[in-house]
Amino acid sequence: MRLGVSLPSMGSNSDPERLTMVAREAEAQGFHSVWVLDHVLRVFGPILDPLTVLSFAAGATQRIGLGTNALNAPYRHPLILANEAASLDALAGGRFVLGVGVGWNEEEYSALGISASERGRRTDEALKAMRRLWAGGPAT
């Protein structure tokens, strides 16, 4: 069994010192990975971008896996997300796992100007585009 730890990326505990301490302690204790959630609105207080948090954690650690639990693919342009995820994985030495979801918060979709009813289709299209890009092909 592999065990992971959720990083404090939301609320009042999401400061650099705490993030560093949790990530390093999880690594020192032998946990498999650290994970972050994804929201764009302050649903639970201040929220940090998940890919930025994991990039920060990658710089503070050496071996522990890094993952999104789960990143809402429909919120982002697939080409940019593919580049960000591949960049994070490369800079982290292959430790990144991109967990993808469709999201649930209709307020976030509304704030982004996206119809929540399109989230499944948008996620499918994003996954196809990202796979093509990572394989060296065209996005379309």
Image (cartoon, rainbow, N blue to C red):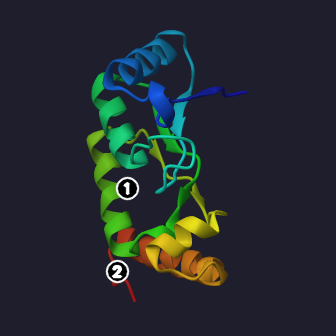
In the depicted structure, whether residue 45 falls above or below residue 5: below
Residue 125 placed where, x, y %?
A: 52, 82
Residue that badge 2 annotates: 137
Between circles 1 and 2, the one closer to the viewer is: 1
Q: Is residue 81 left or right of residue 101?
A: left
Quarter of the picture holding the C terminus? bottom left
Residue in the picture at 61% in, 84% down: 118
Residue in the picture at 51% in, 31% down: 34
Sort mark 1 into few (<14), some (14-19) or many (20+) by Cα contacts within 10 Å: some
Residue in the picture at 37% in, 39% down: 53
Residue that badge 1 annotates: 85
Q: Nearer the viewer, residue 43 or 62?
A: 43
In the depicted structure, whether residue 87 falls above or below residue 20: below
For numbered disc 1, what is the local secondary structure?
Answer: helix
For numbered disc 2, what is the local secondary structure?
Answer: loop
Sort mark 2 into few (<14), some (14-19) or many (20+) by Cα contacts within 10 Å: few
In the depicted structure, whether residue 109 falls above or below residue 3: below
Q: Is residue 105 left or right of residue 30?
A: right
The numbered mark at residue 74 is: none
Quarter of the picture holding the N terminus? top right
How many numbered marks have been drawn onto this rendered protein structure? 2
Q: Is residue 71 left or right of residue 23?
A: right
Indicate the amino acid at tag 1: Ala
In the depicted structure, whether residue 102 falls above or below residue 14: below
Q: Is residue 119 left or right of residue 47?
A: right
Work out how far the residue at label 1 is from the one at label 2, CA to CA, in angstroms: 17 Å
